Structure formats: C-alpha cells, structure tokens
Amino acid sequence: MITAYILFALKIADQWEKAVVLRFGKFSGLKGPGRFWIIPIVTRSRKWIDHRVMVTPFNAEKTLTKDTVPVDVDAVLFWMVWDAEKAALEVEDYRSAIAWAAQTALREIIGQMQLADILVGRAKMDADLQKIIDTRTTPWGVTVQSVEIRDVIILKRWKTP
C-alpha cells in the first residue's frame, strides 16, 4: 500500500519543464525541474509546460494582397513560454492559440501590403508579424523570438465569368 502511494505521489520534471500543480482544482504553484511530491487525489499536476524555444510553421493560403493578387505565404514562428502559470491558466491550449494567432496576423499583414512590398520587404514583414503576434501572446505568458517568411507563391488569378 505504501509503495503504491509513493509511486503515485512522486513526480519528476525534466530540466526544461515546469509542472502546474492544482490543489482541489485551484492553482497551488509550479514545481520542477527535478523531483517533487504531490498528495494523490488532493493535488494534481496534469499540465506540464516546456520552457524551450518552440518552432511553429504556419501559412496563409489563397490570401489577397492589397492590390488583389492571390498568394500563398509560408512562415515559421520561434517562441517560448516565459510564464508557465499564465500559459496554463490564461488560455486553454496555448500551442494551438499561438498557431492561430500567427496565421491570422499573417493574413492581416498580407491584406495590407502590395505584392511588390511583400516580395522585397520580407524583413519588415517579419518584424511587423513578430510585433503583432507578440502583442497577442504576451498575456498568455508567451514571447515571440522571431518570425521568418519562408516562401511567397503567386497564384494564378481567379477567372471571373
């Protein structure tokens, strides 16, 4: 019986992780890295937050530029969690939310730019995207380190009847 209790009570967080600990469903604190103990049934640590730099590819398919040229744009986002408590408590699934925030920001930026500006001004577009996404994700305890446009594909214009 005691052995089973110890097995359920002992938790180990890796060097890059923090465990979000809830006691009776309320935030109790962060544990880790290393070994820590919980009280089974009373305390839970279901959410584990990774503090390493994450990479999220995202794209904007068939988006119109300001001069109504359809383009597909692929980009990659480098981000990390700096506040595990906010990442766990302020947004349900911070990884998905970051990907969606990045994609909508990319569509916003494309819609405000001329095709020529997109093709020659990738560095400015990267900086603008980083600023917009970082503003959206900061309340979730996430910071954007960089955004890089990987590819811009000009699509054939749609045929109008």
Image (cartoon, helix red, strand yellow):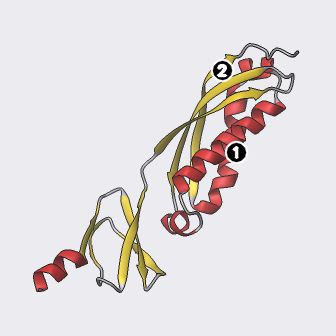
How far from the left and from the top, in percent, is residue 154?
71, 16
Tell me which label, 1 or 2, sits earlier in the chain: 1
Tell me: residue 109, above or below residue 135.
Answer: above
**What is the secondary structure assignment of the residue under circle 2?**
strand
Describe residue 69's horizontal placement relative to residue 126 as left or right. Answer: right
Q: Is residue 111 above or below residue 10?
A: above
Which residue lies under the disc numbered 1? 131
Judging by the rendered image, the residue that carries numbered circle 2 is 152
| Quarter location, residue 89 | bottom right
Q: Position of residue 96 (x, y in %)?
A: 55, 50
Task: Report the amino acid beneath label 1.
Answer: Lys
Q: Quadrant of the C terminus?
A: top right
For this view, does 146 lie left or right of residue 156? left
Which residue appears at 59% of the width and 67% of the height?
90
Residue 134 on image: x %, y %: 65, 49
The local secondary structure at tag 1 comes to helix
Q: Is residue 143 left or right of residue 133?
A: left
